[in-house]
Image: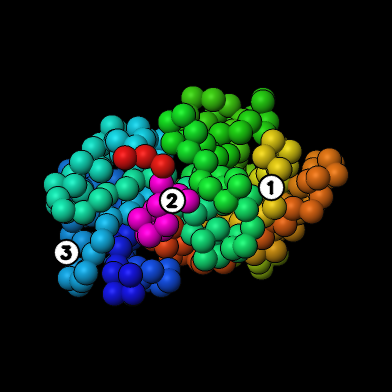
């Protein structure tokens, strides 16, 4: 298998990335672009344009992580944060482009969880929750060393655990979901409503700016990080009690805030995770950074016995 490679694709509300990944999980070639607000075919044309930039190589399969929810394993995707795609036949389109290769599509947060279990912060642990905190909040669940898909492939979707029943409306139609509070755009909007960069257009005041201002000690920005950390800590405590985890690995853009986010996560998690079996759980930053989605997508092909249980 040493000379074989997987074409990996990572599609989210903020960015799209494609790459060539080797059997050790190393990303050899890499292309990315911001995800535009365009229609379905415009999004697909961008995916194809990125793929056209990659070198030809000895491919054994195509692995994809895409924002959810989706119809799985059919790979018809309807990402909440990409309104241009609703029931878009992503897997079928890729099969048309690569007719001789297996194509495996899963939730983008699932592929991050797979990557962290295979080569990252959860390596060597059998029970791992991998999370992405970015434009949305998602997750994937490894139990007993195997990916848990659930009835529709959406198991582990921690972003829609309710952490505040009277809280903010969520794009899913619910209220008080973890994603409604802790996703980057919602956090920036909350901070602006509290007076942070109130003179700016919301579209130009991002969660990255918020984290940078928090690092400089801006009180509203610091409060926003605490708000996100508290919601995440509550959600993780609930997931830990339900699933009896070893490791929770958190990646995504907002996770780059470091201790400003992880300190309130840890404090809140410890306050709520009171069962004895939950006290050994480690909540850590994801180890693989911005390429984790590509690494996990490749693992759907390279390590299918553990991570792919469909046709």
Task: Report the front residue among 148 and 208.
Answer: 148
- Residue at the spot 35% in from the left edge and 55% down from the top edge: 301
Task: Report the front residue among 124 and 129.
Answer: 124
Residue 175: image tag:
none
Magenta-colored stretch includes residue 197 = no
Query: CA gap, disc 3 to disc 1?
Result: 40 Å
Residue 305: image tag:
2
User: In the rendered image, which residue does mark 3 sit on?
Assistant: 52
Decide if residue 301 is on the left or right side of residue 230: left
Decide if residue 194 is on the left or right side of residue 282: left
Q: Quadrant of residue 230?
A: top right
Task: Report the front residue among 272 and 188.
Answer: 272
Counting from the top left corner in percent of width and height, residue 12 is at 38, 50
Counting from the top left corner in percent of width and height, residue 169 is at 55, 28
Counting from the top left corner in percent of width and height, residue 189 is at 54, 44
Nearest to the eye among marks 3 and 2: give it: 2
In the displayed structure, would residue 242 be above or below residue 48?
above
Say whether marks 3 and 1 touch (CB < 8 Å).
Answer: no
Q: Earlier in the sequence, mark 3 or mark 2?
A: 3
Residue 161 in view: yes
The stretch in magenta equals 297-308
User: In the rendered image, which residue does mark 1 sit on?
Assistant: 245
Q: Which quarter of the figure is the C terminus placed in? A: top left
Nearest to the eye among marks 3 and 1: give it: 1
Q: Quadrant of residue 49?
A: bottom left
């Amino acid at each position: 298998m040493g000379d074989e490679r997987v074409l990996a694709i990572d599609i989210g509300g903020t960015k799209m990335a494609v790459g060539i990944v080797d059997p050790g999980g190393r990303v050899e070639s890499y292309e990315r672009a911001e995800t535009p607000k365009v229609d379905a075919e415009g999004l697909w044309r961008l995916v194809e344009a990125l793929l056209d930039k990659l070198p030809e190589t000895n491919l054994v399969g195509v692995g994809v992580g895409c924002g959810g929810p989706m119809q799985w394993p059919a790979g018809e995707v309807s990402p909440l944060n990409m309104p241009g795609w609703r029931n878009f036949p992503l897997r079928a389109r890729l099969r048309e482009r690569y007719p001789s290769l297996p194509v495996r599509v899963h939730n983008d947060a699932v592929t991050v969880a797979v990557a962290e279990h295979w080569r990252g912060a959860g390596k060597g642990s059998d029970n791992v929750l991998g999370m992405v905190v970015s434009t949305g909040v998602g997750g994937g669940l490894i139990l007993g060393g195997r990916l848990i898909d659930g009835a529709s492939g959406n198991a582990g979707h921690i972003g829609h655990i309710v952490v505040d029943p009277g809280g903010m409306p969520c794009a899913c139609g619910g209220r008080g979901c973890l994603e409604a509070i802790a996703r980057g755009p919602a956090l920036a909007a909350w901070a602006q409503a509290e007076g942070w960069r109130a003179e700016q257009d919301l579209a130009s005041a991002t969660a990255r700016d918020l984290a940078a201002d928090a690092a400089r000690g801006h009180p509203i920005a610091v409060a926003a990080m605490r708000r996100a950390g508290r919601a995440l800590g509550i959600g993780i405590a609930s997931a830990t009690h339900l699933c009896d985890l070893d490791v929770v690995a958190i990646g995504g853009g907002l996770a780059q805030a470091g201790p400003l986010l992880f300190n309130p996560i840890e404090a809140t998690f410890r306050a709520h995770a009171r069962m004895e079996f939950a006290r050994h759980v480690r909540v850590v930053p994801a180890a693989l950074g911005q390429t984790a989605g590509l690494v996990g997508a490749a693992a759907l092909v390279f390590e299918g016995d553990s991570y792919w249980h469909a046709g």
